[in-house]
């Protein structure tokens, strides 16, 4: 936490402006260095968020990627979402030299979500079920090399069609979001490994995005792929690429939906799932794509977990995020031995 006079250039503040006394009137400031793509900066560092944060004494400072990170700052927090081994090494070196700075989030923890096998392994291991419901992962098969063996492997594994085919690697490129629906196992050999094949679970065309920001959980409904009937399955063959149906900010929260489909997952189940994943993944910032098996009350499947997702699409994100950043720094302050 910085006191007056220690801040260099700040995002979103004109030259020579009086330093904004933050809302609580204290002169303590939190400096967040960020390294984000321009797309992410635009969607996440919205003006309303920057000004709200500034009033809380939080200032965002762009990290100059053309200068050594160690020569920049000082920062209380470093917030980043960039791909590539080189950037990971920069952050790891910085974190070793500056253990006092909170890194959101550690690169090796983020890496865990860049592979759709390791991504869901913790959920599968959890095998979470209690009196409020059950959370699992759809049956899936990983195809690393030879696509010609897919039909045999699918049959051997007793996988039920249709299947969703997803690139195994999630690296922020458009390619990692190229998904296909397969109505027969033979057409799958046209796909390019490495990939994961997941059983398609009917879920009434609605998906829950469970946003996690530290200890906070926010549930958003999003439209999703419609159910596929046995009749349709018997009539259709082949492979169909589909668009990113659930990514648009257009939430389904305002639409009238069948309550048995649209009812949020039980809070207690979400609290347990979020708590376990925060601990096992070692992440503060992620969301969970969860679907309810159509026709059941509380049988849920996690189909995707995303690092530092589109928080700008999350209602009230500016309050949630600023409270989170303040709590991070205040908790660190409390832990500091009396000097
Ligand atoms: N096993 C499944 N059963 C039913 N529908 C699925 C399944 N897997 C994916 N889908 C549908 O495909 C959409 C995209 O899947 P997924 O979220 O895994 O891809 P993604 O590229 O990681 O998307 P994003 O990162 O933008 O959330 C889901 O929102 C859902 O509509
Ligand atoms: O609707 P959400 O917030 O889930 O959309 C996210 C998406 O889930 C992924 O997290 C995207 O990141 P990549 O997987 O790295 O592509 C996010 O894109 P980003 O540009 O905001 O990081 C989507 O917003
Ligand atoms: Mg998803
Ligand atoms: Mg995803």
Image (spheres, rainbow, N blue to C red):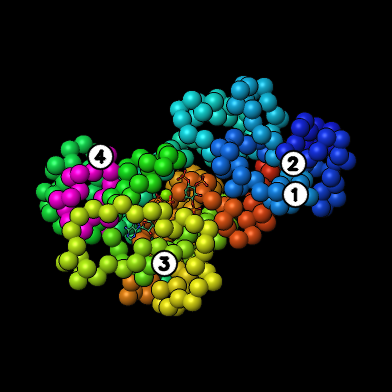
Residue 314 in view here: yes
Q: Dot 4 lies on which element?
A: loop
- Residue 175: image x %, image y %? 37, 41
N-terminal-most mark, 1 or 2:
2
Classify mark 1: residues with Cα within 10 Å, few (<14), some (14-19) or many (20+): some
Q: Which residue is mark 1?
A: 51
Task: Quote the CA–CA distance across marks 4 and 2.
Answer: 44 Å
Disc on res. 12 = 2
Task: Quote the CA–CA distance across marks 4 and 3.
Answer: 29 Å
| Marks 4 and 1 close (CB-CB < 8 Å) | no
| Horizontal side of residue 124 vs 183, given as left or right | right
- Residue 281: image x %, image y %? 45, 46
Q: Residue at x 48, y 25 (%)?
A: 86
- Residue 161: image x %, image y %? 20, 60
Q: Residue at x 48, y 46 (%)?
A: 307
Placement of 33 over or under 305, stated as above or below: above
Disc on res. 193 = 4
Q: Which residue is mark 3?
A: 206
């Amino acid at each position: 936490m910085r006191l007056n006079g220690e801040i260099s250039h700040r995002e979103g503040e004109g030259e020579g402006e009086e330093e904004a006394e933050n809302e609580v009137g204290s002169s303590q400031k939190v400096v967040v260095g960020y390294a984000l793509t321009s797309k992410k900066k635009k969607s996440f560092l919205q003006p309303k968020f920057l000004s709200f944060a500034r009033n809380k004494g939080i200032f965002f400072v762009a990290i100059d990627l053309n200068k050594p990170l160690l020569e920049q700052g000082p920062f209380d927090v470093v917030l980043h979402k960039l791909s590539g081994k080189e950037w990971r090494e920069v952050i790891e070196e910085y974190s070793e030299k500056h253990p006092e700075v909170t890194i959101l989030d550690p690169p090796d923890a983020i890496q865990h979500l860049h592979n759709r096998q390791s991504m869901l392994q913790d959920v599968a291991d959890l095998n979470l079920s209690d009196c409020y419901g059950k959370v699992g992962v759809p049956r899936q098969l990983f195809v690393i090399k030879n696509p010609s063996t897919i039909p045999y492997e699918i049959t051997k594994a007793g996988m039920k069609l249709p299947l969703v085919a997803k690139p195994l690697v999630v690296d922020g490129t458009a390619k990692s979001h190229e998904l296909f629906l397969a109505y027969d196992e033979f057409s799958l050999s046209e796909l390019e490994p490495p990939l994961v094949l997941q059983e398609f679970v009917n879920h009434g065309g609605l998906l829950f995005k469970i946003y996690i920001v530290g200890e906070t959980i926010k549930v958003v409904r999003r439209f999703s792929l419609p159910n596929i009937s046995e009749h349709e399955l018997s009539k259709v063959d082949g492979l169909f690429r589909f668009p990113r149906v659930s990514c648009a900010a257009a939430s389904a929260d305002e639409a009238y939906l069948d309550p048995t489909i649209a009812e949020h997952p039980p809070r207690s189940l979400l609290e347990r799932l979020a708590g376990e994943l925060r601990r096992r993944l070692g992440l503060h910032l992620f969301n969970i794509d969860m679907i309810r098996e159509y026709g059941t009350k509380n049988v849920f499947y996690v189909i995707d977990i995303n690092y530092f997702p589109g928080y700008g699409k999350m209602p009230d994100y500016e309050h949630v995020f600023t409270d989170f950043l303040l709590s991070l720094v205040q908790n660190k302050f409390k832990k500091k031995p009396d000097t």
